[in-house]
């Protein structure tokens, strides 16, 4: 075989394959160029999912007539200065590969006019060759039309899905940019029909409403904004769903780092960790989280499409996201309402999101200032740390299951077992963090026989169980001796231990081992459904619940209480 250097067109087709995989990648590159050009309005039109044509029009800075051809040369870019530090990438593009790659994969026509130029200039490529160039009357800005994508690469065409599915990908790309740049007016039309219209007001809630619909967005909570003002090393803001508004996948957890949409498993997990024990298993939140970091902390040069980034201080960012989400939920999540309208549906148009990229991060003028969840007239700040749960007065018990309580805001039904689980769970975790957990030595060691499954659980969770106060040693074939148990366990230590292991097996809350152990122990020790409670016991339970950090859900995400508002009662009884 002879070795030869690739012809430039071949070389750019190969490189194009890395960047341009499908119509949505063309849209992504063109929209990024428009954003880098400072556009305030970007219109995307696609035909047949972009396979027949894609047109992106912006009102950005334009390309000087004399440089139009140069923009299509490989590695021609206006965005990276010769001596620049590649860590300091503050524009979305920087490699100068997109335009030549697109021209290698499709027929392209570009018209561009910088505002100081009296008229625009048009340039047309067929099969990667410039075939036509000349002056053209046009408004300031740039319009790029891409036709017959991959017609000369049938192999790639074969990998594509239906036009509808490609249109979905394009919708996701535009959605993510609309969320990343709420100050830009985005319009997406598919086959002439409007698919997405972001108003470009700079208000994140309005941008999010264009993507998810106003109803879903009205339930979202503003992430308690965080900014490390002194060192300017980390800032956070965003919107997250309350624990009862969930999705079946993680697709609606969107992360933006320095305004670049990124895929990052660890940080996605950090968002979910913020819900610690408040999400039902298999359900995921909807979250839009913006992180701002110094440019040198982010390496975007990991992936050709720049969707993956490497972070220098990932652990720190992880902790900041988790804590911000947690604080947001503790302050703002509403109590589940009885008779509240069930609002959450599926997102409209465009649906879910693939991705943007960020630039130099002007401040996102965020969302409506002080968001008050509509469902809870008594929402944040009612009694300090347990905002959202007002002072409750128990008035009785129903079915030996529920405590009935009242406050100025109406009537509350409290699930006695779930509420007590929440109380014990937080107490057990706090004991782990502050001191040694309360344990109770047994006068007479108890022996317990474990099934093979229980033994497997013991070897997986042994450290966490010991940390909670179980003192346990092997005692012959399949048998174990218990010398001490957590004080939360009242009687019959051996049986209780086996029961906790069984609960661990069913535990569907957190993925963190020590949280799972605490949740299982809390579940075992919590007051049973079916137990009659005295007035004093009810008062104590309610007071303890009010003092927890997340009083509205048990450690598995089920509600601890339901609220029937005074307002709703008055309406139902036609008092007003
Ligand atoms: P990159 O974005 O990495 O610089 P591209 O191939 O995407 O590479 O674009 C090459 C150059 O063309 C850009 O650096 C920019 O100067 C110019 N350009 C492309 N699209 C636009 C646009 N919509 N508005 C203004 N300039 C543009
Ligand atoms: Mg570019």
Image (cartoon, helix red, strand yellow):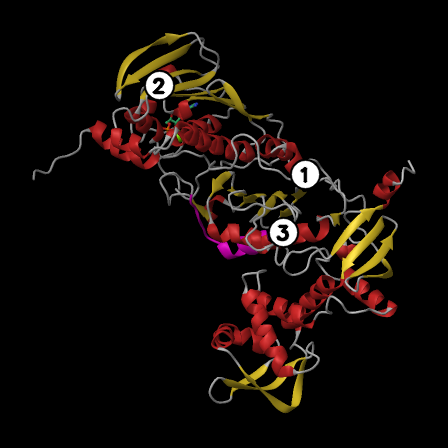
Counting from the top left corner in percent of width and height, residue 427 is at 69, 69
Can you identify the residue that label 2 sits on? 68
Residue range of the region highlighted in magenta in the rendering: 308-321
User: Residue shown at 39%/19% (left/top)?
Assistant: 145
Can you identify the residue that label 1 sits on? 343
> Residue 109, relative to residue 6: is it above or below?
above
Give me the C-alpha separation between circle 2 and circle 1.
50 Å
Q: Is residue 397 magenta?
A: no
Query: Quick check: is the Cβ at mark 1 less than 8 Å away from ligand 1?
Result: no
Secondary structure of the residue carrying tag 2 is: loop
Q: In the image, is 353 to the left or to the right of 218?
A: left
Can you identify the residue that label 3 sits on? 324
Closer to the camera: disc 2 or disc 3?
Answer: 3
Closer to the camera: disc 3 or disc 1?
Answer: 1
Counting from the top left corner in percent of width and height, residue 73 is at 29, 26
Residue 63 found in image quarter: top left
């Amino acid at each position: 075989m002879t070795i030869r250097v690739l012809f430039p067109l071949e070389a750019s087709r190969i490189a194009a394959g890395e960047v341009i995989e499908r119509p949505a990648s063309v849209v992504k590159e063109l929209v990024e160029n428009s954003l880098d050009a400072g556009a305030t309005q970007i219109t995307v039109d696609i035909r047949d999912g972009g396979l027949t044509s894609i047109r992106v029009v912006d009102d950005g800075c334009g390309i000087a007539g004399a440089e139009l051809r140069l923009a299509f040369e490989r590695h021609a870019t206006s965005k990276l200065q010769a001596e620049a530090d590649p860590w300091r990438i503050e524009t979305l593009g920087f490699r100068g590969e997109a335009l030549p790659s697109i021209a290698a994969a499709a027929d392209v026509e570009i018209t561009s006019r910088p505002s100081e130029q009296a008229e625009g200039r048009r340039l047309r490529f067929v099969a990667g060759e410039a075939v036509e160039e000349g002056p053209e009357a046009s408004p300031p800005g740039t319009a790029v039309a891409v036709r017959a994508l991959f017609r000369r690469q049938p192999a790639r065409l074969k990998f594509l899905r239906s036009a509808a599915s490609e249109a979905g990908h394009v919708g996701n790309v535009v959605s993510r940019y609309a969320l990343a740049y709420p100050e830009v007016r985005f319009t997406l039309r598919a086959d002439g029909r409007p698919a997405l219209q972001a108003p470009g007001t700079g208000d994140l809630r309005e941008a999010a409403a264009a993507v998810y619909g106003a109803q879903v967005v009205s339930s979202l909570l503003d992430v308690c904004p965080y900014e490390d003002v002194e060192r300017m090393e980390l800032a956070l803001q965003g919107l997250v769903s309350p624990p009862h508004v969930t999705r079946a996948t993680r697709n609606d957890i969107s992360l933006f780092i320095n305004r670049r949409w990124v895929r990052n498993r660890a940080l996605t997990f950090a968002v979910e960790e913020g819900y610690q024990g408040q999400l039902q298993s298999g359900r995921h939140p909807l979250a839009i989280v913006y992180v701002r970091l110094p440019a040198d902390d982010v390496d975007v040069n990991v992936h050709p499409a720049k969707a993956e980034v490497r972070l220098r201080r990932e652990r720190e960012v992880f902790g900041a996201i988790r804590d911000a989400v947690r604080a947001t939920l503790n302050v703002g999540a509403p109590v589940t309402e009885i008779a509240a309208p069930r609002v959450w549906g599926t997102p409209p148009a465009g649906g879910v999101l693939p991705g943007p990229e960020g630039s130099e991060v002007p401040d996102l003028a965020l969302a409506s200032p002080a968001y008050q969840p509509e469902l809870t007239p008594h929402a944040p700040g009612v009694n300090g740390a347990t905002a959202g749960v007002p002072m409750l007065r128990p008035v009785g018990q129903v079915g030996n299951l529920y405590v009935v309580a009242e406050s100025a805001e109406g009537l509350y039904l409290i699930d006695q077992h779930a509420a007590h689980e929440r109380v014990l769970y937080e107490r057990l975790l706090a004991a782990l963090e502050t001191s040694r957990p309360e344990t109770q030595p047994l006068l007479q060691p108890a022996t317990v026989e474990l099934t093979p499954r229980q033994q497997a659980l013991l070897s997986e969770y042994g450290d966490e169980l010991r940390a909670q106060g179980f003192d346990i040693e092997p005692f012959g074939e399949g048998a174990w001796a218990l010398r001490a148990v957590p004080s939360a366990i009242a009687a019959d230590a051996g049986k209780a231990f086996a029961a906790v292991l069984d609960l661990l097996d069913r535990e569907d809350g957190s993925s963190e081992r020590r949280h799972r152990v605490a949740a299982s122990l809390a579940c075992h020790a919590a007051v049973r459904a079916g137990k009659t409670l005295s007035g004093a016991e009810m008062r104590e339970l309610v007071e303890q619940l009010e003092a927890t950090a997340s009083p509205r859900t048990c450690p598995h995400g089920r509600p601890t209480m339901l609220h029937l508002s005074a307002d709703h009662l008055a309406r139902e009884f036609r008092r007003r």
